[in-house]
């Protein structure tokens, strides 16, 4: 089976507000797939729907051939879906190391453990006993990604990871995403940063007002200035 994640015609709501209108796409094993869209287009809601934080009212989420609708968010993590939320949600009063150890609650074992994390993120080793809340925004973003990797996900969901980062940190993040991709991890990324998306993605979809309006391989998207203008306000 080639598809790791199938999102089939999902409709999601906050209370009575209908936010996603039949969102549909699939992510193949090992690829980096980018969901692009403006502020409020529905990217975060799509991610929350995949991990059942906002369970879709209609449609299916299928992971490794198994429908996961109705499961709890911690089940999604145990199955291997690792979400790095947009709002980072680090535990500011806890040490960096304790934040990392929380990532192991998925119960999954694999390549990533504290030793590997400290090799890839030396700054987290330097800061391991520091309160996580004292780190910069970019460092906290690295910690959130590292914490999710500690759960050894099969697919990594990165929700607008470049948001609020300095150009230097965006470059660090790009190299990190390329490294994780090289290791064979499937990645679903949401972004507004077109340059970042083009630097890492294999395929791109655009969401607009809760509808998927475009799908292409990264090379076609690169050359499609009209679509960028129309949906991404470039
Ligand atoms: P952003 O970059 O601003 O995070 P996004 O593409 O991730 O944008 P979503 O956060 O998914 O967009 O928001 C989609 C729509 O849902 C927006 O109109 C937003 O106002 C609305 N929305 C988001 N969260 C809630 C909530 N908890 N309750 C009600 N409406 C919400």
Image (cartoon, rainbow, N blue to C red):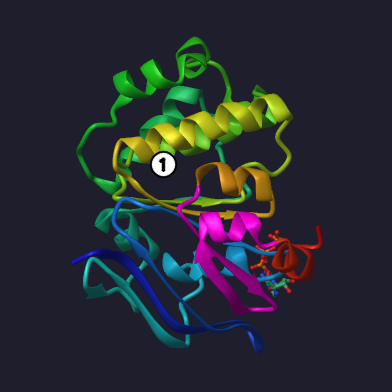
Q: Which residue is mark 1?
A: 148
Quick check: which quadrant has ligand 1? bottom right
- Residue stretch in magenta: 201-224
Q: Is residue 221 magenta?
A: yes
Q: Pointer 1: residues within 10 angstroms few (<14), some, or many (20+)? A: many
Residue 171 appears in the picture as rendered: yes
Query: Mark 1: is the Cβ under 8 angstroms from ligand 1?
Result: no
- Please determine whether, in this image, residue 148 is positioned above or below residue 93: below
- Out of 234 and 130, give the one closest to the viewer: 234
- Out of 217 and 149, give the one closest to the viewer: 217
Q: Position of residue 120 (x, y in %)?
A: 41, 21
Q: Position of residue 158 (x, y in %)?
A: 51, 49
Residue 93 appears in the picture as rendered: no
- Please determine whether, in this image, residue 8 is positioned above or below residue 135: below
The residue lying at 62 percent from left, 50 percent from top is 160
In the figure, is residue 74 to the left or right of 123?
left
Q: Kindly indicate the quadrant of the structure image that contains residue 111.
A: top left
In the figure, is residue 128 to the left or right of 116?
right
Label 1 sits on a secondary structure element that is: helix
Q: Quadrant of the C terminus?
A: bottom right
């Amino acid at each position: 089976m080639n598809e790791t994640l199938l999102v089939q015609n999902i409709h999601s709501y906050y209370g009575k507000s209908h936010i996603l209108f039949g969102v549909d796409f699939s992510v193949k094993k090992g690829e980096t797939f980018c969901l692009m869209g403006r502020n409020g287009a529905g990217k975060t809601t799509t991610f929350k729907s995949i991990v059942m934080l906002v369970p879709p009212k209609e449609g299916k989420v299928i992971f490794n051939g198994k429908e996961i609708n109705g499961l709890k968010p911690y089940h999604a993590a145990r199955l291997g879906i690792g979400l790095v939320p947009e709002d980072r949600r680090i535990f500011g009063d806890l040490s960096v190391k304790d934040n990392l150890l929380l990532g192991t609650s998925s119960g999954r074992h694999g390549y990533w453990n504290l030793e590997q994390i400290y090799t890839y993120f030396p700054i987290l080793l330097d800061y391991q006993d520091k309160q996580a809340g004292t780190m910069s925004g970019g460092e906290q973003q690295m910690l959130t990604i590292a914490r999710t990797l500690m759960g050894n996900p099969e697919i990594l969901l990165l929700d607008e990871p470049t948001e609020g980062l300095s150009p230097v940190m965006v470059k660090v993040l790009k190299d990190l995403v390329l490294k994780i991709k090289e290791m064979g991890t499937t990645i679903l990324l949401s972004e507004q940063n077109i340059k970042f998306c083009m630097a890492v993605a294999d395929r791109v979809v655009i969401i607009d007002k809760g509808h998927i309006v475009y799908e292409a391989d990264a090379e076609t998207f690169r050359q499609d200035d009209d679509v960028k203008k129309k949906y991404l306000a470039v």
